[in-house]
Structures are given as C-alpha cells and as structure tokens.
Amino acid sequence: MDALARSRGAYVCRSCTRSLRRQWLRAHTYSTAATTPDIYDVVCVGGGPAGLSLLTALRANPATTHLRVALVEAQHLSKVRTWKLPPDRFSNRCSSLTPTSVRFLDSIGAWKHLERDRVQPYHEMQVWDGVTGARIEFDWGLGAAPSADAIEGTTIAYMNENLNLTSGLLKRLDELGGVAVFDGAKVEAITYGPETEELDLRQWPLVHLSSGNQLCARLLVGADGANSPVRSFAGINAPGWDYNRHGVVATLEMEGDGWRGDQVKIAYQRFLPTGPVAMLPLPGRFSTLVWSTTPANAAVLKSLSPKDFVAMVNAAFRLSPTDLTYMHTQEAGQTDEYSWRIQHTPHDPRAVPQEVVAVQEGTIASFPLRLRHADTYIAERVALIGDAAHTIHPLAGQGLNQGQGDVQSLAKTIEYAVTHGQDIGVTMSLEPYLAERYAANHVLLGVCDKLHKLYSASSGPLVPLRSVGLSAVNALSPLKSFLMNRAAGNPLKLF
Amino acid sequence: MRPALRHLPRRAVRPTPPAPRPTLTAPLPSKSRPFTSTPPHNHNHTPSSASVNETEISHFSALASSWWDPHGPSRPLHLMNPLRHDFIQRCLSTSPESTPSSFKLRYLDVGCGGGIFAESAARLPSTQSVTAIDPSPTILAVAREHARRDPALVGSKGRLTYVNTTIEELPLPEERSDRYDVVTLFEVLEHVDYPAAFLDRVGEFVRPGGWLVLSTIARTWMSWFTTKLVAEDVLGMVPRGTHDWEKYVNEDELRGYFAKKGGQWGAPRVMGVVYVPGVGWREVTGSERIGNYFFGVQRLS
C-alpha cells in the first residue's frame, strides 16, 4: 500500500496509519507486523460489477480521488483481467445494460474499455402470453431502412457478457491506479477497530483477511452478493422468498442474424405458466437464453443432449404449454417430438425468434431465483450495493442495472459528503443514498414479482384478465412508451 | 454553535432554566433591540467574560451527551452543516483574488459546541487549520472525545485544535496577516448579551481580505411563533429556555452595524434558509427577514 499514489490532504494520511500502527504495536506487543490494521476511507468487499464500478467512480472523480480505497475479492482477478474468448464464443452469463447504465459507465471512463464488438444493442421487444397468445410489441416505430442515428436513439438496452463488463472495469481501474487490491483473499471475520491513546476506532469495521491483512474502514461497502457477509456483520436482515424456480441459461446459435438483420435486433420473452422464457440477441447469429422454470424442468433440460435441448428451446417459443409439459417428461427424443408437433401448431414464424440451430458446448447452466430486499442499505460505517442489497427476478433484466443505479447514487453521496467535510462513514452522510435508492428499488422488485406471479397461473380468472391487460397496453401507445422508458432505465418523472 | 431548532421529542435533558411561559395574550417584547449597547459600566462584568452568559452555558452543557446523536435534538444542526460550507464557498468566490482556490484556509470557529462545523472544516482538503473555541468545558470534552474517532482529525497533522476559552480571552495574533481567513459564528449571536461589543472583538480576528461568516435568527413574529411558542411550549421539541427571543438579531441590524465601521467591511452577503421537517434545510430567497439566515462580510482593512 505504500506504493499507492496519494494526493495532499488525503482523508486518512499515511502518517496517521503509521502512528496508529506504532500505538497498536505498543498496546498489543504480542501481535506481529502482519496483523496490524491498515486504515482506509473505503473498503469494498466484492469485485463484481457493482464493487468495481463504485471504486472506478470514486477514483475517476477529482473530488474523491484522494480517498484511500481498498478492494477485497475472493477470486483471483488475473482471470478476469486476461478474459478473452474467440469472436464466435460467448459466455452464458449476460446482462441487459440500460442506456442509463451505459451513460454512467461512460462517464466514469469504463465503457470504452469493454470489447464493444461483443456488445449487442437491441431495439425491439416482443412479449407475449404463452397461454392466451396476447401480445405486446415494444418498438420505436423504425421504418424498413432506418438511419444509423435513428437506430442509436432507439436502443432499448445492450446485451453484454458480465465478464466483458468486469474485465473492462478492471482495465479502467488499472489505468486510474491507486486502489489497494486484496484478491484471492477471503473475509475471515469482521470485527471493530482498536482504541489507542490517540484514536478511538471502536466503531470502525475491521476486516480480517485470510491473507493475514487487517483493513480498518471508515466506510465498509458490501458489494459481496446475495449472501453478503458485510450485511450479516451490520445485522441487516434481507427478507424475501425463493420462487422455487431456476433460471436456465445457455449461449445459442441461430439460423440467421435475426428477422430484421444485424442492424435492428429484437428481444423476445414468452410468459409460460412455469415462468418466462427469454431470448436476447448477441452479435451476429448468437443469442443468450434465460429460461425461468421449475427446478425439476431445469434438471431435465440440463440432462438433455445438445440436439434435444435445442428442440426444447424452439418448442418453448412456439408450442402450447400442454405440449411443453409433455415434452418435459420425455427422457430423450425431443427433436422428433418437436418436428412432429410444430407441423400441427399454427404460428407466425416472424413473430417468434428465428430457429435455434445449436447450443455452445458447456454453456448450459442454471441458478435458483430468489427475491431478497435488505431492510436498509446503510448502517454506521456500512453501505450495501447491488445483490447484497437486493436480488430481483430476472424477467425484466434489471438486476445489474439496479446495482449500477446504487453505485451512481452512493458515489454521488460520498462526493457530497467529502466536499462538505462530512465523515463519509456515518449514517448521517449516507442517508441520501438510502433515500434515493430504497423506494426506487422496492417498486421495481415489486413489479417484477407481481408479473411473475400473474403469469404463473395457467387457468383461472386471472388468465383472460391479463390478456386483456396486455392487449390493452399494446393498443395504448402512451402507456407503452412509459413501459419502454422504464425498461430503458429512464428515470420516472412524477411531475 | 447553538441549536436553533430541534424537531424531535424532548429527550432526557435537564429543562433549564425555567423561562416564563409566554401566552398568546401576553404582549411581545418591544421590537427594537438595543443592538449597539455595550455592557453597562456599573455592571461587574470583566472584559474577559463580556460575551458569556452563564445561564446559556449551563443550558447547552446539559445537551452535551446528545450532541452527536444523528437522531437527537441536534439533528437540525447536523442537517444545516453542509449549507454552512456552501455559503462560505459562495462568500470566498466573490473575491477570488484575496483567497485563490489553491490557498489553504485557516479557520476560527467561535462557539464551536460539540464540533459539528469544526470537524467538517478540518476534513476539507482546502483547510490548513481549524481553531475551535467554546466557553463550556463539558461540551468541549464531548467535542474532543468525538474527534478521536477520526484519524483525519487527530495525530501528527493535527488540523483541528479545541480551546476552552471565550473570544475575549483568546490572544489576538499580533501580525494582522496571522489572523484568520475565515472566522465563523454559527448559531451564537442570538445567545449573546451584548452583540455589538461581541462582534467588535470577533471582527479583530479576521485578517484583511478574510471573511466573518455567521448564522442566526431574525427577531420576527414568525421566529417567536416557531422557536418559542411551537418548538418550546406547544410541541416541546426543544427544552424550554433554549431561545431568548429578545436576543435575536435582525439582518438589517447587522447590516447597520457593519456599515458604521467606516469602510472596514465590504458589502454583506446573505442567504435565508427554512427548515422543512422531514426534508431538511432549504434556501429561500427573502427568508432572512423572517427566520434563520446566513450572513457573511469581508474585512477590507
């Protein structure tokens, strides 16, 4: 850490750290140099998209660049730094980045470090009810041959591999420098700091790492995921529920570049009684699949041969829920079953994604879906961001964007505190972050949760009602543009 | 620094001293305050304690334990603190030639209380030093203890120094250029018995080109209604006796005081602020004539 560049007037000066070390040694003569705490203004636990974005935002802003910051990550970051795939191979963990998130990433200088030819903007969404067929089309009314400017202005979101984002953020952070990185280091315990003659750090979190380092934090940021150890340390509960659904992901190769070619790309989502299945465009002939379904169905899908898996995905966007239920009971042979059944299923091929022709090897995976929302995002000298604060149903592709929204807000809150001489760790300084993000996240979590539940019914009074709802939304252009603006992450304006 | 308005339920503080309860039928005190008055000669005040009212000191000492509780009675003061910095920046920016942005500032905070402003000023990268004084040893003990929680404030760099003294007893730096760049007086003036004599003394500590920045409450029907009747008597948000309405100082009285100093001071800058419960402080143009306001004036010679 001594090699770190620091400007004058640093919030925590090096000499304080040194003098604390001396006193700490005096007070604890049994301790060794390896276990003396280092004092930081911000210690961020978790080097995912949220944690890396936050540190990048703080380092890139002249008002906060003098803060001493540290990153703690259990994985070795060299793997992320050197991440590289051939142009025709894509990671199966992709996320939708809204234009708002992209603007933010650009403002902190990270966007240009992503491999841009691996990022796919999309301009249309096709969403329909798998039971009744009621449909809503989200497009910006692009003509047959839209201009490049028109396409740029009508991007709903950008599909991007998560690793492309974290790798780009790391490159930007390396360029900025000044972050003490502790990677490949597990958080073994979080306690409170020491008290010396001169200093009272008994309210400062002290992070003990498996490497033997001890980091004392003015502000400890939990960007450490859904099972956040930082959240547990702060005693913050995160109530929620399991959906008893798994998200099955895969990278798929399609028969072509899409119905509107490589220029205007379309995202598809069909609501099935078991959960929504979504096909999101990647560059060229590739797409990424997110299929929310029951754990039993997910297990079947993962056990199938690549050919049968492809048939099931094609079926999921075309056949009736009854057909699909039957095909999930087959141990094999879905390919033949699909080619027979599709002949007897009337459908408009251009209203569904192009046919899938192959699945990339080793890209089929699944993860359980949960809704969690922490009771608060802040405590004395603690702030939670991203999945540590909330996990959402993936049906609206908002999880990563919510995290970026948190980061933007927290970075702004820290900047305000620093420029007004406030201690950035105390709850008084962190309150604006909580006020700005909690309600906004809560609304989005609730909407996605209700959508999931609404479309989980295959019969009953809700089914015709929801179709009326979708058809009505489709007919009402103001409401549609409202929904599209939400999907694109534009801020909600009440007045 | 003294709490101006506190908006949370009465805490376990000693309600000192019992002030006569105003009633709606009782006539308000006369509107004009003998602002330019100095301590009467027959009074036994020593010059060293001219600004200090013992009752006020004991009253605020009783609040010491809750000073740094973000949800305690001092919450409005904590919320107001960022605006103090905004106002100081606004003042300094009017004369960039006397304080260039690269300049490291020396602050004197008079009546620092628990150190809400003093700590924040000491944390700013643009600060060279902060000297913070208060006559109450109890409150200064709280301030010193709290500063130990931040390595940026204590230790070898030591940008923050607390002194238990009054402005009258604080030695005046002999060289005029050694005096302070910014002298602050937040929520103090309304608790001082003889404001003119007090300001005479405080003004001496400002270097030529430096700023005297203060905040206080105007003496109006509205401030009597909000700070005395509603806050102290009706809702009990503030311990009775926190405010003495008759001591409030109006903005035009301050303007008059500085104008009479024969060109020693520049044209004042003023910012009126209003506390909105649940939201915080908001700048409201013109409200300096109604309630809380900031007042900044540059020393020219």
Image: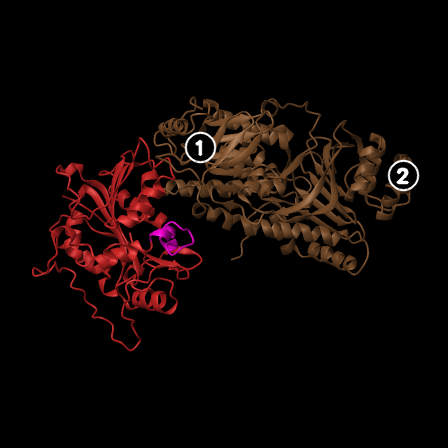
Chain colours: A brown, B red
Q: Nearer the viewer, residue B125 or A82?
A: B125
Task: Give the mark, 2 or 1, whose residue is nearer the N terminus.
Answer: 1
**Relative depth, front residue between A263 and B43:** B43
Residue at the image position 19 percent from the left and 41 percent from the top? B209
In the rendered structure, the answer to whether residue B143 lies left or right of residue A218 reads left
- Give the spatial CA distance, label 2 vs label 1: 57 Å
The residue under label 1 is A40
Residue A125: x and y, percent? 69, 44
The type of residue carrying mark 2 is: Gln
Label 2 neighbour load within 10 Å: few <14, some 14-19, many 20+: few
Is residue B246 in the magenta section? no
**Segment colored magenta:** B64-80
Asked whether residue A277 appears in the rendered view, the answer is no
Q: Residue at x 12, y 56 (%)?
A: B45
Q: Is residue A462 left or right of residue B116?
A: right
The residue under the point 25% across, 72% down is: B28
Name the subunit of mark 1. A
Task: Residue type at mark 1: give it.
Answer: Tyr
As drawn, the label of residue A330 is: 2
**Tag 1, which secondary structure?**
strand
Give the secondary structure at mark 2: loop
